[in-house]
Structure formats: structure tokens, C-alpha cells
Amino acid sequence: MILLTGGAGYIGSHVAVALLDAGLDVVVLDNLSNSSPASLRRVQSICGRPVAFRQVDIRDEEAVYDALKTYGVTAVIHLAGLKAVGESNQQPLNYYDNNVLGSMRLLSAMQRAAVKTIVFSSSATVYGAPSYLPLNEEHALAPTNPYGRTKLFIEEMLRDLHAADGDWRIGVLRYFNPVGAHESGYIGENPLGIPNNLLPFIAQVAVGRREKLTVWGCDYPTPDGTGVRDFVHVCDLAAGHLRILKHLKAPGLLTVNLGTGEGSSVLQVIQTFEAVSGRAVPYEMGERRNGDVAVCYADPILAKNVMGWKSTRSLMQMCADHWRWQSRNPTGYSA
């Protein structure tokens, strides 16, 4: 049995599908602060298999411990946490409380339950401003916002835990920019309020929920002046969790990037989305935002060499799958 924290969220629901399709049993813990139980009902419809669910906050150590023991959990995939960079600048204590304290309580419950296998959802934000590209796992770690620092602190906690007890099996996945949706169009990204990420904002403009997109910065040293990022399909990302679980058969700690190794600019993404959706995406140019970098993309070779993972879906497929989800669910799960 795999315990999936934050499993009702965007990435979590896609990881749940990947696990179920691989024949694994799943129990989801989620406090539903930024997700919907409807996603899990749809996961069950896609896979034709049940998902156990408990509405639990990972800061509730006793509730986490009870779930670990009740379901006979053998491994944890830890995705629960707050994830908006801008919000983290405004509410840093909330981010440290949810992300860092929550992870500490989760690990404490796991230790008590003698469950010593965990895959942690980290982020490329731990690198901060790139000093070279592509970003490999040896790059210096210098996050520029509280969200990124919470991810780094959790990584350090895991490294210390493994150093103290060599029986732990730990995988750290540094995501780049997850986008897209399941090919069924049945589950996808469903941000509450104003989207923080590029693709859901573009999709909401295309479907008519928002008037226009603001492109933050048009004078970067890039081919078209807009920022360049490494966008990776959420289903490729979900497959990475299966790969690292299979790799963690012996005690150890592995940290890998999950990205395509290629960058796409904001304008390229807009143009690709317009092409696959047949909809115009009006936009205006705005000033650069503090903390944004010009270019950021992964060196994913370690994930390929060590655990046989590589991204397989193009930017066009990412946009097409995202549009299929958004066009069929214009108001998200609330429909």
C-alpha cells in the first residue's frame, strides 16, 4: 500500500492514476485546502479501482500514524504542501508551518510506524538563479523565496535523517514546470482563485474565464525577450514517481531532476496553445517580476541513467492535453 499525501491535488491525482495503473494500492491523505475530492472520484473512474481516502492534515501526527498502521503502508509519496511562490513571500510563516513542520510530523509518524521509504516532491526552485545551464543536481542550492527554502529545508531534513539511520530509502524529485493533463480530459489542474502558473492562466483566457494574460517581462536576453522555462508533462512526471519507487529497493538516498532538458519561452507556449486550441489568447506585456530569472531548464540525464526515466511528451501535446481538460471542464471540478 502506497500512502500519497496531497493526493487529491493536481500532481497527486495523476500520480494516483500511475500507481493504480501499475497495480499498486493507494491511500490518499489530503486536507483539501487546495484540492477537491472530485478528483479522486474521477481517478477511480479512470482506473476502475478504488482509492482509500482520509481527510487529514499532515501536521496531525497521530492521524498520519493511524493511517500508516491501519492500511499497512509500505512507502510514502509526499506531495502535500503549499506551493505558490508569490504567496510564500507574503505568508512565509504559513509556508514554514505547512511545508516544513508538516513534513517533520509526517517523518516522525513514519519513523514510529517503521515505514522507511519515502519519495519527496521537491522543486527546481531550490537552485535559485542559475549560475550555469542546464541545471544539474550538483548546482549550488540557493532558493530566492520562502517556498523554495521550505523545499530545501525538507531536503536537508531527509539528508540528515538518512545520515542518522542508513535503513531509510529516500527519493527526492526536483520538478521543473508541470503542465498538461491526463489524456482522458477527466483530471487536470484546477487552481483555486487566480492561477499562479502560466498554463492554467492561458487555458482560462482561452476558455473565456479571464480577459487576458499578462506576460511579465519582455526584455530578457532570450530569442523573443520573454522568460524561458522547462515545461514537463504531468503524466511524464507521474511516471517518474513509479520509476524512483522501483529504484528504492535498497537503502539509500537519490536526488534527481525531472524535466525535459529543453526550454520554451512564454510566447512560444502562448502560440502553441493557440494552435492546438484554435482560440486566441490575448496578452499584454508587463514589467519583470522580482525574483524571476531569464532562462531555467534541467539537465535530466541522471534520471535517465540511474532509473531509466525520460520525458516523452512534446510541448504541443502538453498544450493539447491541458486544453482538452480545460475545454471539457471550463470551471474545473466545480462543474
Image (tube, rainbow, N blue to C red):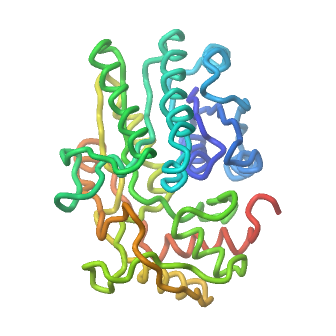
Image spot of residue 184 (x, y percent): 65, 64
Position of residue 239 relative to residue 293, above or below, is above
- Number of labels in the image equals 0
Q: Quadrant of the N terminus?
A: top right
Position of residue 1 relative to residue 295, above or below, is above
Position of residue 121 relative to residue 197, above or below, is above
- Picture residue at 66% right of the left edge, 44% below the top: 8
In depth, the one of 297 and 144 nearer the eye is 144
Image spot of residue 183 (x, y percent): 60, 65
Image spot of residue 52 (x, y percent): 71, 32
- Picture residue at 48% right of the left edge, 21% below the top: 107
* Most distant residue in the right direction: 335
Displayed quadrant of residue 290: bottom left
Q: Is residue 107 left or right of residue 308?
A: right
In depth, the one of 268 and 220 nearer the eye is 220
Q: Is residue 132 left or right of residue 322?
A: left
- Picture residue at 59% right of the left edge, 60% below the top: 182
Image spot of residue 135 (x, y percent): 23, 56
Q: Quadrant of the C terminus?
A: bottom right
Q: Is residue 246 left or right of residue 76?
A: left
- Picture residue at 54% right of the left edge, 86% below the top: 283
Displayed quadrant of residue 2: top right
Displayed quadrant of residue 254: top left
